[in-house]
Amino acid sequence: MLYIKCPHCGLRPQTEFSYGGDATVKRPELNKEVSDQDWDNFVYLRKSPRGKHLELWQHISGCRQWIKVERDTLTHEIFTTLKANENI
Amino acid sequence: MSENFRLDKGGLINRDKKISFTFNGKKYFGYEGDTLASALLANGVHLVGRSFKYHRPRGFFGAGVDEPYAIVQMNRNNEVDPNVRATEQELFEGLEAKSVNCWPNVDFDIGAINNFLNKFFPAGFYYKTFMWPKSFWYKIYEPIIRKAAGFGSASIKHDKERYEHKYEYCDLLIAGSGPSGLASAYSAAQNGARVILAEDKSRFGGSLLTSEVTIGNQNGKEWAEKIISELKSMPNVVVKNRSQVFGYYDHNMLVMSERVSDHLPKTDKYIPKQRLWYIRAKEVVISSGSIERPLVFGNNDAPGVMLSSAAKEYLKVYGVIVGKKPIIFTNNDSGYETAIEFKKNGIDPIILDTRKEANSEIIKEAKELNINIKFSYVVVAAKGYKKVHSADIAKISDDKKNISNIENIKCDCICVSGFWTPTIHLASQSGNKTKFNEEIDAFIPSQSKQKETTLGAANGVFTLEETLKTSFEKGSELSKQITNKENKVSVPTVIEKKSSNHDKFWCVPLPEGKNYKRFLDFQNDVAVSDIELALREGYRSIEHVKRYTTLGMATDQGRTSNLNGLQLVSDIENKVVPQVGHTTFRPPYSPVSIGAIVGREIGKHSKPTRKSPMHNWHEKNNAVFVDAGVWLRPRYYKKGNENLFEASKREAKNVRQNVGVCDVTTLGKIDIKGPDAAEFLNRVYTNAWLKLPVGKARYGVMLREDGIVMDDGTTTRISENHYHMTTTTAQAANVLSHLEYYLQLVWPELNVNVVSSTEQWAGAAIAGPKSREVLKKLFPDLDVSSDGLPFMGYVEGNLFGVNAKIFRISFSGELAYEVNVESDYGNFMWEKIMEIGEEFNIQPYGTEALSTLRIEMGHVAGSELDGRTIPYDNSLEGLVSKKKDFIGKRSLSKSAYVAEDRQKVVGVVPLDKKTSIPEGSYIVKDAKAKLPNPKLGHVSASCWSVEYDNPFSLAIIKDGKNMIGQKLFAMSPLKNKTIPVEIVSSHYVDPKGERVRS
Ligand SMILES: [Zn+2]
């Protein structure tokens, strides 16, 4: 079980969080023309890297904040955790 | 059999307390403090089971977790417990155990014929033998293997025992209470660290209980006792026996199983049988010691052949001698220690040492005791089927290739010592890349991956002096980093006998013309010849060899077999062991019961049960409940002998004719506040929200980004910047996360806050043509006329002193209101509604009637919004704004979503107006078409229309908009039904929606 440092609450067990996928995906802006390809990339296509991955987690049984977690998908090592508005 | 293998004195057992127990139906006696194994050995019982594959007789090989084959089935307090090691099971009065792996019994085992047919059971025999003919597998091979194999049979009854989970945090978790565990725990505790010290066995002290050493002015055992009692008195230390740390998981999370009551005849009230500890430790000390390695020779699995360390433990801890004519077969000094113990207790052992010569303090002591020592000697083969009665021994050449002078000598046990294997399982599980240590011919931990430190014998350190020194130091160093305190502990002086170097020899060659089975893996019956065969057949990777031969698999995880197996592979391959590498160690280190893993999360405890504030009222009024997510909701209220169908029809009819009331507390509710709330809702929902006035509700549909409908519900503008959103019961949590996602990550510039208010409000839906009359009396001060409170209107009212929110919204399609009060007043509100509604024939209605009402109205719900449908499919396209952008909008222009023949919801009526259509039925054009019959869609929901008194269903079918009026078929292969149907509009009742606006 992972031990995730919520930037708002501190170290908490994984069971308090839910996973939210790749944190680097950017939603296309509202009311802007988006090509089929770009939209499909946004909705469906995700990389599945072996190694470092910046991902979203929500502290669902805690402060309910969405946070960013840089984690090694192979070793589960967590390098850093960030608030939603922070970037690496 | 009389108890004739127990010494008159000695051991740590309580001789004042005699205990009776039965094994294989026969009664024996032992003492308090015995294990089942020690008590059986004291009674001269060596035959405990049959081996896994060949069903060869098997006895005891170890004295604890190292035991590969003395596995029994327990019957404790009317519960069956399979796969129990006799060497770990503590004796209690009335204990009942029996052998496994034998049928009909341990003395006469039909499966033993496998032993004589063993050329048919070579490596990979499962793969080879039982593959052909295929049809034989289920009927013949599999049932026979089932009967013949396995470590006991599990009960199919519900386990009445109680198991618990515990979550714990500490600075240092120390796994193992031998010298390294005690010393590191002690110095860490002195520095104020929060320490958990775990010991697998019932007694603390590990090797100190059996070794002849002096620490300070005490012997090893006394010193261990002193340290333990000091640790127990410290508030920052938790000391646990019968507790095995079996798994090292991510981020320094370790799991330990505590056998709380297994040593007792039955589990006390309020105490669990076993407790699983999830421990998050800042630092972990692995002090798990080492396990003696077997030497490999002919028939080395015969009962009576055992590890020399086990023989010593039986003697020193239990006062039991495992034989009266022992052979000690050793390649190092450890065997001498066992021999000396025998000798001191009046038994004459003979030592066969594989070394040409060796000198040390221990050997000198053995010589002084006149123990018969034969250097350059080996055991070639043990003789005796159910019990060793003699051994063929021989002289071995200096190059260890040839044996000569074979002779047979009488013996009743053979104690083997092939040096020591550090127990590195936990370190390896944590990700430690272990390294091979040439000096001890074994792997030891190297670079730590997590916060783990391995000390003592587990780290390949076999002298007590060095173990204590490094352990005191490490315990102090690790804890100091955490507590910033340092209280120096002085390391006591140690007196121990020095050992000489061990011999790297481990496998006795076969004599000319003999074909003895020489076992490597005792639990899985893997012999030298099996590994040789696997390599001849081309298996190279040690992981493949393991799976092909089953070497090192099953519950014993290769504890005694691993290194000898690796040695053999490297010898044949002309490699060195580190090149071959070892297989991956995986948790659990030894078996953990399913009960302990599950803990208390069984039955009703597997998930929370949520009840509305009106639950007791429902119960008192004969509600039959249904699980709705985690909620319990009334499905119907039973009157007299009514069944579900009759009751729900009555309830639904009463809503259409008079007035009904339904508990809608379970609906998800989200409170939304902020100056940008309207803009946010406008982006979340498919329809327009900017112009919704205060005091008005609106129905909305929200999508996922892929265009699929996520949820629907009404949201009401309570005040300028305050909205009250409702979601479906099932999607409440997902919708909240969804909203938070967009607010926190996508549009953080919007000034909006959302919070779940589901549990703050109790809700009652009052529906039916007479609902306004009820409302008038509930809120006499309010104008609830159609003008005063129009459809989709919202007002706040005073319900006999309680603040209430009143929404004029309808799910039933009738004139309807939803009244919300604070949860604590829910029951008060409900009783008032029932009291006032009586004169209007009000009746409560459950989810079944609720479904009927919405289905015949064509209102889509969860069965249509099933995560696969878009707004169009649900005839909700009218709610999709063309002007503004919103979540998921871009996906709606995908070609599949705008296809001419896109699926759409329709109504379905059976032509005979009688036959109900099973939910999930396929809609097809031709009932007799060749299979697979192309399906147009499926029936999503069915009811008995109370308006028309005939069955009615909703279906989502291809090209639904052009199908109205078509005669098709509903087929349910599961129910074996084919029903001719007509497709009609999904809005079966009041298609213009006049009632809700009345
Ligand atoms: Zn948090």
Image (cartoon, grey):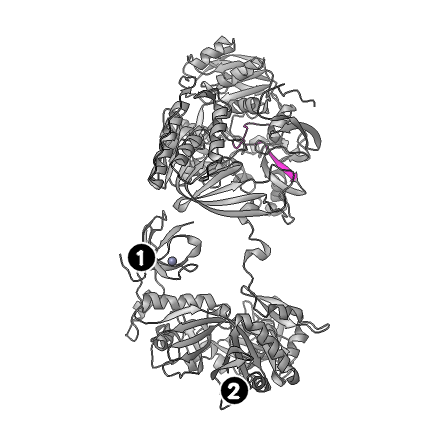
Disc 1 chain ID: A
How many dots with numbers?
2
Q: Nearer the viewer, mark 2 or mark 1?
A: 2
Q: Which mark is residue A82?
A: 1
Disc 2 chain ID: B
SS class of the residue under badge 1?
Answer: strand
Image coordinates for residue B644, horizontal then vertical, percent: 66, 72
Outermost residue toward the right? B641
Outermost residue toward the front? B801
| B63 in the magenta segment | yes
Q: Which residue is mark 2?
A: B782
Cα distance between the residues tagged 2 and 1: 52 Å
Image coordinates for residue B387, horizontal then vertical, percent: 62, 23
User: Image check: B135 left or right of B297?
Assistant: right
Please report the residue visible at 36 percent of the width from the left and 26 percent of the height from the top.
B438
Assess disc 1: are there few (<14), some (14-19) or many (≥20) residues with their C-alpha within 10 Å of its C-alpha.
some
Assess disc 2: are there few (<14), some (14-19) or many (≥20) residues with their C-alpha within 10 Å of its C-alpha.
some
Give the camera-side residue of B938 and B183: B183
Give the camera-side residue of B242 and B563: B242
Vertical position of residue B52 compared to residue B648: above or below: above
Could one spot residue B901 in this view of the protein? no
Q: Which residues are magenta?
A: B59-75
Report the amino acid beneath label 2: Leu
Q: Which mark is residue B78?
A: none
Report the amino acid beneath label 1: Leu
SS class of the residue under badge 2?
Answer: loop
Question: Chief secondary structure of the magenta span?
Answer: loop
